[in-house]
Amino acid sequence: MSFKKTMLAVAAVTALTAATAVPAMALENEFHGMYRAFGYLTNAETGGTGFNLRDNSANTFFAEQRARLMYIAKASDDLKLVTQFELDSRFGGMTAGKYQSNDAGGLDADQVTLETKNFYLDFNIPATPVNMKVGTQPFNDAFQGIFSAMDATGVVASAKVGAFTPTLGWFRLSDNNFDAATGLLPGDHVADLIVLDGKFALNKDITLGASYYNVQNDETASTGTAFTNDYQLLHMLGLNASAKVGPAALTGFLAYQFGDYSDTRDLSAYAAGAVAKVAVGPGKINAAALYLSGNEDATGDFTSFRQVATNGAVSYFNPSNMWLLIRNGAMINSSAQIGGPAGATQTDLTRGNVGLIGFFGGYEMAMGKAFGSANIGYAMADEDGAADASIGTELNATIGYKVYDNLTASFTAAYAILGDGMNDGPALLPGGVADADDPYMANIQLSYVF
């Protein structure tokens, strides 16, 4: 066994041993959850299988729903078990794309659709400032989710020591199956993510952070893995900062990736972003910018920014407040964006390695139980090859009402003016279609949380 794998095994065993040392106590039972339903009218969104840009497009209507149920078995403030389950379906049933093959949205509904989202032990190690989380848990990177905002199985240790908050984590992203014929054992070919984050509060208004992420991908096609990671070894160094200056809340980050893309190509990629929220009148002005480097050519260094999974399925940039140019975090299984390789669900922020340059702005406000927002965004490729780099410009607006403290209803409309890179053939960006109609979407959302 390699030194790396030995140390990971020791860390996992130590965490589990510490958990068993905590004395048993009377349980408190906590239940939380949410329900969200969407009804969509669109000429491009396909309902769980991505975008379908086309000429002479037609309207379509579909609806989908999601429920999440969380149960927490709390022994004390220092020890609890957290579980969360999810149910998804499209009205009428769906057996492709992001939906389960036994979707319960069809006639008579009787299907098994309960998904396990989280189950992990959350405990504090006695006489130390260290908190441990062991199991399948949520993880969000320090870069607004552009690398990963996911649920994964691993061990995370964090602590608060004065103004300093360090975090150390290990996640096993994929592992091969036992194969008696070849002698392949669990742990022989794996994909692991190692996380080292640190934040330091200079004062109550300014926080600085630094991160190191490492993905080691030993999987091969012969192991039958479904892990969508096309690079072998990734090192990612990053800096981030947040500050409150008067009415403004500011966040920024820089990241550099290097390592082995393949046996013959090195990885060298960049990302940068900035987010601002400024209180103005009864609401806030929102502004965000994002840069992800694209790949320059088929030889030499591979320069497209890599997400933890190549297809971008667990990566987001929610500060954009977009619905078409960048998928919105509120979406359920119809979670996609304009552009990307043909046949994909269009969740890759780099659109098939061409990168991204985006600028986004808007205003949001609430008055009593009513709320609303309006946003505009522009996106283009970083590397366009023979095509025009423009992806498009989006306009969207939302109005809503808080029916009860836990129940809101809202209506959103979004329209994108496609750039020449998406509809001015024949040299099109990934996902482009010659003479494609501009895509639009309107949805009604009902959201309940408890």
Image (tube, grey):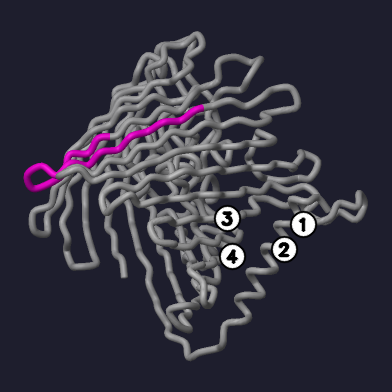
Residue 304 vertical position relative to residue 197 in the rendered view, above or below: above
Dot 3 amino acid type: Gly
Q: CA distance from mark 4 to mark 2?
A: 16 Å
Dot 1: few (<14), some (14–19), or many (≥20) neighbours within 10 Å? few
| Label number found at residue 243 | none
| Of the pair 154 and 335, the residue shown nearer to us | 154
SS label for mark 3: strand
Placement of the C terminus among the 4 image quadrants: bottom left
- The residue depicted at 12 percent of the width and 46 percent of the height is 283
What residue is disc 1 on? 6
What residue is disc 3 on? 169
Q: Which residues are magenta?
A: 270-287
- The residue depicted at 35 percent of the width and 18 percent of the height is 419
Dot 4: few (<14), some (14–19), or many (≥20) neighbours within 10 Å? many
Q: Note whether residue 47 is visible.
A: no
Q: CA distance from mark 1 to mark 4?
A: 19 Å
Looking at the image, is mark 4 or mark 2 nearer the viewer? Answer: 2
What residue is disc 4 on? 135
- Say whether disc 4 or disc 2 marks the residue closer to the N-terminus: 2
Where residue 100 sits: x, y (%)? Answer: 55, 55
- Say whether disc 1 or disc 3 marks the residue closer to the N-terminus: 1
Do callouts 1 and 2 mark residues in contact (Cβ within 8 Å)?
Answer: yes
Dot 1 amino acid type: Thr
- Say whether disc 2 or disc 3 marks the residue closer to the N-terminus: 2
